[in-house]
Each structure stands twice: as C-alpha cells, then as structure tokens.
Amino acid sequence: MDLLNTLVDKGLRRELPTREEALAVLATSDDELLDVVAAAGKVRRQWFGRRVKLNYLVNLKSGLCPEDCSYCSQRLGSKAEILKYTWLKPDEASQAAAAGVAGGAKRVCLVASGRGPTDRDVDRVAQTIAAVKEQNEGVEVCACLGLLSEGQAERLRGAGADAYNHNLNTSEATYADITKTHTYADRVDTVQKAHAAGLSACSGLIAGMGEKDEDLVDVVFSLRELDPDSVPVNFLIPFEGTPLAKEWNLTPQRCLRILAMVRFVCPDIEVRIAGGREVHLRSMQPLALNIANSIFLGDYLTSEGQAGQADLDMIADAGFEVEGTDQVTLPRHRVDAAAAAGCGSHEGGSCGPCGSEPAAEPSAEPVADANEARTDLVAVRRRGAGTDLAPNA
C-alpha cells in the first residue's frame, strides 16, 4: 500500500506526514488494519524498540472540580458515583505510588482535580513529590494539577518534578463544545509554561467525544507543533452521570487506527495508551502495543483498569519487555536536543499522561454493531488512593 510505505519512510526520517495522509490512515478499512498496525509498528520499533514504559496514577484529590469538562466524571455537576476526597497527605500519596513502582511503574503521575493549583497547593504537591522520591529511588514524577499560573512550573521543577501533563483533548475548533469554563488557549499556555520551565511536557487527546476525523488530525498536528515528549491517547469512558454518557462511538479497530495516525505524526515521541483502553480496545490491546510504547499500570483516576498483573502478562505474551529505570525512554536525539536547550528533565525519559479519563472518538464511518455500549466494562474505582483497600498495581 503506497500510503503506508510513504508513512513508514517519513516516520523513519522523522518527517511530518501531510494532513491528507493522516486523514487517510483514519479512513482505511478493516481489511487493511493489520497492514496499518504493521506499518506503525516499524516506526515504533525504530525509535523505541520493544520496550513498554509503565506509568502509575495517584489521584491526590478526587472530584469536587469547578470546571465543566463534559467528558470528566469529576466535573462540576457530575452525578457519577465516584470517590470524592480532598488532598491526600504526602505519606498517603507516597504509599500509593510505591504500589505502582513495585508493580513495575517507572513514572508516577500525581493528579489533582481543579481549575489549577494555588500557591499553597504547589507547596503541598512539592512535599508529596519529595516523599515519593525519598521512598522510591529513581522514580520519575509527573504532576498534573490543571492550569498553571506564572512561576508555578518553575517551583514544581525546583521541587523535583520531572514532567507536567496538561492535555489539549480536542481540536481548537471544537473545544468550546466540551468546555465553557476555560479555553483551548489556556491549555496551550500551560503546556508552554511547563516546557519553558524545563519540565518534560506531556500533552495528549481524548477520542470519542463526537469529533470528526479532521478534529483528531487537527489536535494531533497541534500537539506535534507544541513538541511534547509524551502524547497520551485517551478513549472516552462514558460515565453515567456525565453529559457524554451516551457517546459510544469506538470500535477496537477504530482505536488502532487512531493510535497509528498519532504514531505517524509523532514518530519519535512517547505515545501512551491512556484511559479507556480496556473499555474500547478490549482483546485487541496487545495489538496496540505494536504502535504505542507506553501504558498506565492498573487503575485510572476514577475508574478501574484491568489487574496490574494482567498488564504485565499481556506485555510479555505479546513479545515486549517492561522498560527499566536504567533505560532512557526517548531516542537519543531528543534527549540531546533537550539538554542543549537547558532542560534537565529528559535524562530519564518522557512524561506520563496524568490527568486524563479516556475519550473515544466518533468518526465519519458507521459504528459497528459489535461496538454496542459496554457499560459492564465501566467500573468506578473503589480501591487505592482515598480508600482503605490495597491499590491495583
């Protein structure tokens, strides 16, 4: 297939595909799917080998958010029956993080709901970062606290944060359809603040909120322009009690095409399968490892993932290996470029996608009957941080 040969050649040269080529990936048929996965896999192996980076989420503060993001179970007015609690103490967060590290996670993502942190919140998170790093030698820490004010990114880096996550989520053209309480430009500004402070920037998308193929391509091209080290791809978890509860737009095949498109546009950037992989990829998850080089281990912010051991078994059975703390995630040319720019946060690799619940994408193609609403796969997290039950890791 000429399209795929062209995209592989461009990916191996780190050359950006055209928008038309990216759209064509999303328009491929199910009969062509394995060819698409194989082509994206060549690019993935060129820059990341067969390593899979594991990341672990710790929800520092759950629910109670004043923002109105339609996809989020923690949003203002959400009726989703999720865990709600205020800030974890540093030792509580550190204990939760230790479970993920023991399970093989290289990066811990510290997430808190809200519009953005106050200076007091930054102080609190700084103490938590110190506690996590003291208890877990060599761990990378990514913070995800919402919109940043001037100077806060620098303070987080000074406290030991390696990375900062803030997702663009969807295209600029459709952003106002999902959120009214802040703007797309606000999100871009926070990613730029993190980058300028020397933090490893992490920013991704949510697929499945009613967007068109063009919106998906637009947001991925915007992300490429921002040049994050990590791009988490979320597939919408349609929580009951949120405005998008009825948005079941994805098939496993569609998810694989989206991941492949992201890999071709971001060939040498860490691509992470984030929230919703169990709900939408289901038994096709191992195939997705041929495209993405990073996943979350265990549970998400407010929803349950599959058992941590099942993640590890899946990686091994698919012929991949868990990336060790002594291995650098990013290709050498990206590490060297970051060092030359004065960023000290890239030695250990790239950022993990922190605050994201999954999003799936609606496409122009008809949704397959087999992708009927799988509400049985949407389980609210009832263990780990904020509870007395052991974490899933």
Image (spheres, helix red, strand yellow):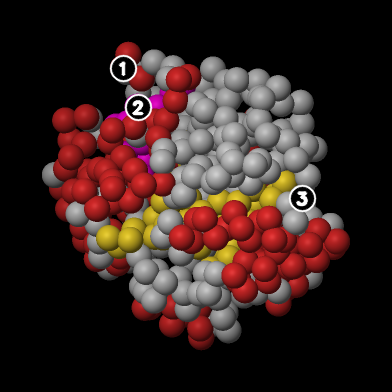
- In terms of sequence position, does the residue under pointer 3 or pointer 1 come before the other? 3
Q: Residue at x 41, y 51 (%)?
A: 295
Q: Residues within 10 Å of mark 1 (few under 14, many from 20)?
A: few
Q: Residue at x 40, y 27 (%)?
A: 250
Whether pointer 1 and pointer 2 mark residues with C-beta atoms closer than 8 Å, the reply is: yes
- In terms of sequence position, does the residue under pointer 2 or pointer 3 come before the other? 3
- In terms of sequence position, does the residue under pointer 1 or pointer 2 come before the other? 2
Percent position of residue 196, x then y: 65, 72
Percent position of residue 287, x then y: 25, 43
Looking at the picture, tell me which residue is in the foreground, 5 or 106: 106
Mark in the foreground, 3 or 1: 3
Looking at the picture, tell me which residue is in the foreground, 137 or 197: 137
| Most common SS among magenta residues | helix
Q: Does residue 336 lie above or below 290 as drawn?
A: below
Q: Decide if residue 366 is on the left or right side of residue 128.
A: left
Range of magenta residues: 248-259
Residue type pointed to by label 3: Trp
